[in-house]
Image: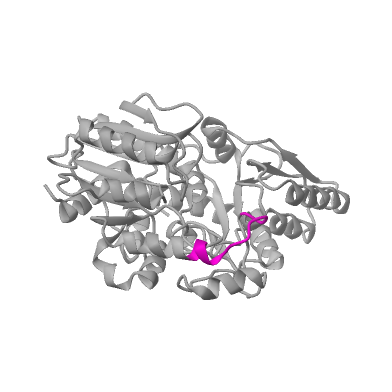
Amino acid sequence: MQWTEKQHEFEGIEGLRFGQGRPSAALRGVRSVLHINDHGGQLGSTEQYIDSTSKALLSIGIESHLIYGQLCGKLGHTFRSTQCVGALSQNRDNAEAFKQISRAVRALAPDLVFVHNIFDIGILEALLSPGRKYSLLWFIHDHHLTCLSELRARLDTVNPECRTPLSEKCLSNLKLGYCIQKHKEREYLGEDLLSRLDLLRFAKRADALIVPSQFMRGLLIRNLSELKSKIHVLPHPVSRPVREILPSANRDYPSLLFNGRIAFEKGLHIALEALMRLEFSQELLFTIAGPVQDERYWAHCKKLIHKAKQLNPRLILHYVGNPDETQSEELYRKADIVLLPSLWSEPHGKVCAEALAHGAAIIASNVGDLATWIIPDKTGVLVRPKSSSTLARAIKQLLEDANLRRELVLFGRELIRVRFTETEHFWALDEIVRRSRRI
C-alpha cells in the first residue's frame, strides 16, 4: 500500500488534519512565557514537555522562564531564567514561596503564564492578582483535579475506567477498596475531597484549561460542564525525527517491549500472564524497562517471569532498568511489538507516540487516551483491559503476520508525521492563546 492511499484513509478519520504548507511561526505578539511546575528537570512527561516547548519557542524568538519547587535531574539549557522556590506540593501553604513567585512574575512580566502540576490554592490565587496583564493557561496533565486516587481506575468492574464526577461517593469507593490507588498507604478524608473541589472551583477563573486528549476533555467537562468552551485539547507533540528503517528484519527472533512504570496500574502482570498462554516455535525476547515504583508488585512480577520461563524455555526475558530518553528510543527501534496493558485511564499515551515514531507495532488496552494514537487495525491493536487471553491472541496474531506489523508501523509513523508535529502543536496553542488573550 502506497502512502497516497494511506493519506486518503487518514482524511476519512474524524478530527484529523494536515499541516502541509503551514508557516512555522506561532504565538504572534508573545515575547515571553513563564512555566510554573512542582518539579524541574526530567522527572516525567510534564517536565520533558516544558523543556521541549522552551526549545521550540526559542527557535522562533520567544524566551521561556521556569519556576519550580524541586529539582529532579538536569534542567534544560533553553530557559532564559530559572528559579527554585521549594515546596510547591498541594496544601503546603508556603507563604515564602507565594512571595517569591509573586516577585518573579512582576519582574519577568511574561505575556503568558503556563501552570502545570501546581495544586496549591495559595499559589494559584497569587497568580490571579488584580491588574495582571498576562493570560493564565492551566495545563491539566493528569487526573489530580477530578480523582482522589489520581488514576480513575476501578477494581470492581469489568471495564476499569472510572468516569464518575468527583463527589463524596469517591470517598466511600476508596474506603470499600473499589479503586486502584496510586498511593496505597494513604487514607483519604473529607478534607482531601474539599481540597480537590476547591481546585475545580479555581479552574473556572483560569483563562483557559488545556488537556492532552479528547478523553481528558470529556472527563473535565463532566466535572465542569459550564466551562466547555474554556477546555481545549492540545496533544503533546512528537518532535523527534521519524526513522526510515523498520525494526530489524535480520534478527533471528522477534522482540516484545514493555516500557513504563513498574506498578499495578500499568499492567505488566497482564503481559506476563498473556505470554504464559502462548507456545513459541522460536525464541522470543521480552524486554521490560521502567522505574520500579512498587517493590511488592515487582516481586510478584518476578515470580511470574520465573514461571513464564519454566513454561517456555524459548522465552527470553530481560529487565533493563529505567532507561533515559536516548535508551528508550533505542528500545523502541529494536522492538517489533510494544505492549501497553494498562489498567488505568491513561491521560496521554506518551509511550504510544514514541513507539509509533520509532517504528514499532503496538498492542494496547482500550483505556484513556491510548485510542488517540491507536486507530484499530490501522496504527495498532486495541484489546480489552484486564484480559490476558485477549492480549495473548493479539500477540499471536502480530507475531505470525509480519505484513500486518509492517502496515501498522507505516501507518503509525505517518500519523505522527502529519498530525502530531511541533508545527501543528504550536499553531493549535496559538489559537488557544488568541481566544483567551487578556492583553
148 with respect to 202 (left or right): right
Residue, far front: 95
Residue 305 visible in this rendered orientation of the protein = yes
Instruction: Out of 179 and 48, give the one closest to the viewer.
Output: 179
Q: Position of residue 17 (x, y in %)?
A: 28, 57
Residue, far right: 310
Instruction: Out of 436 and 17, give the one closest to the viewer.
Output: 436
Above or below for 105 versus 194: above
Residue, far top: 77
Q: Position of residue 186 (x, y in %)?
A: 63, 56
Q: Residue at x 40, y 33 (%)?
A: 85
Instruction: Out of 398 and 339, give the one closest to the viewer.
Output: 339
Q: Position of residue 141 (x, y in %)?
A: 42, 52
Q: Which residues are magenta?
A: 183-193
Protein image colouring: one colour
413 with respect to 182 (left or right): left
Q: Quadrant of residue 68?
A: top left
Q: Residue at x 52, y 47 (%)?
A: 351
Instruction: State whether the magenta stretch is mostly helix, strand or loop.
Output: loop
Q: Quadrant of the N terminus?
A: bottom left
Q: Position of residue 148 (x, y in %)?
A: 53, 62
Residue 248 visible in this rendered orientation of the protein = no
Q: Residue at x 86, y 54 (%)?
A: 311
Above or below for 174 versus 379: below
